[in-house]
Image: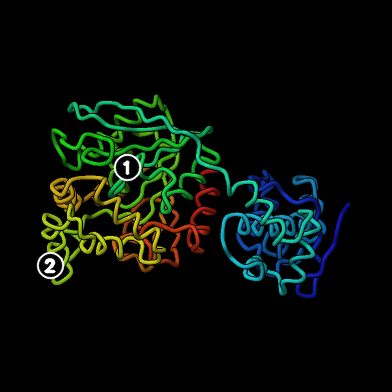
Amino acid sequence: MEQRHSKRGREVVSGPGLPLDAAPVCSDDPAVSYALTLIHRRFAEQLSLATLSREAGVSRSLLAERFAHSVGEPPMRYCGRWRLHQAAIMLRDSRRRVGEVAFQVGFASEEAFSRAFKRDYGAPPGAWRKQQRGSTSGESLPRQQVQYCTASDGTRLAWSSVGAGFPLVKAANWLNHLEFDWESPVWRHWLRELMRDNSLVRYDERGNGLSDWHPRSLTFDSLVDDLEAVVDAAGLDQFDLLALSQGAPVAIAYSRRHPGRIRRMVLLGGYARGWAHRLQGEDLARREAMVTLTETGWGSDNPAYRQMFTGLYIPGGTSEQLDWWNELQKVSTTPANAVLLQRVLGTIDVTGMLASVAVPTLAAHARKDHVISFEAGVELATNIPGAVFVPLESANHVLLENEPAWQQFLTAVRRFLR
């Protein structure tokens, strides 16, 4: 039965709650399509039929008639359900308080939000969240099977594929270990969410994790070769590509080698120019000093040196997460490889490739990232034709589960990939 609730002095109609995996509705009608775009992007604002019709360039009665014919329900009913759908996703995937969620989706009070949410989803927000978490909190990640393939120069690479759905390949980033990353306090939420709707393919690049620690070569081109070999071994004709940090220039170079194979590309904390090209003066001197310290401090039993890296990558981490990242550095590669990798990453420069990237691209970057500056992310996105840029309010290079930026990034990625 149709329900009504009051929001900021106006009436908004709601109905049965949308499934959490519901995609935004589309329409071939230009006016309806424009109204839908406004609802999807500005659902937290005080939208009304008058606002939608004015911006769509048609009368209220005409928009209402054409919207109902195209979508199957009146504009404000759909708007109310979409607003609560976004709230449900936030409740499920973040640790925000109910009141915070209420205001972020446009409700004037927590009480009004709770009443509306209960009508659509059958339980108050807090109770509904516990039900959702209760059904998934004890859920362990599925068993992964590590497989091996060989790069063009004979280097042995470890990779795995888990989940079902359209293939999503995660390019290797600085420090990966297929088994150690599995169910880690830093990567667990990433793995759980990325395989929710996709077949997730991951790999350890040469010199890292379960791949060959004594590769025949370690250059930027060889890192692109690694991605190429894994995609071929997985038998993927087309796929979406997720690339963090150093994975971004690797993904860009791969897209140039293989036009048409990547459907959509997501870059997080990426850059076009390595640190030796980006940094100057004291910043460059400090980065050089970190490379020098790696030679003696990386494999030491004293975690003080590794803590320096950890504090840059996940400054907002819990003690459990910080300890895990310290250990990751020790088990993922040798001091010699860590030095060589840093040198290689410093020399990367794909700026000349950016203008010819033909893959639809979403780029996101944390504003206070201590590893790769926000400006480097802006530069990357600005020079890729048509790229969508999402700034994130975070200081973590790898987004952590309990921060709002993670939910913001996850929502943006799901919408983009759909």
Q: In which quarter of the image is residue 110?
A: bottom right
User: Taking 103 as reference, is 379 left or right?
Assistant: left
SS under mark 2: helix
The numbered disc on residue 222 is none
Residue located at (39% from left, 58% from top): 321
Q: Name the residue under label 1.
A: 177
Q: Which residue is drawn at 13% across and 62% down?
A: 288
- C-alpha span from label 2 to label 1: 30 Å
Q: Position of residue 350 (x, y in %)?
A: 24, 49
Q: Quadrant of the C terminus?
A: top right
Quarter assignment of residue 3: bottom right
Residue 63 can be seen, yes or no: no
Marker count (numbered): 2
Q: Nearer the viewer, residue 116 or 22?
A: 116
Q: Residue at x 20, y 60 (%)?
A: 302
- Coordinates of residue 118 in the picture (x, y in percent): 78, 59
Residue 285: assigned label: 2
Q: Nearer the viewer, mark 2 or mark 1?
A: 1
- Residue 294 lies, in percent from the top left, at 15, 56
Residue 375 figure quarter: bottom left
Q: Nearest the camera: 39 or 228?
A: 228
Mark 2: few, some, or many residues within 10 Å (few <14, many ≥20)? Answer: few
- In the shown orientation, is residue 148 left or right of residue 194? left
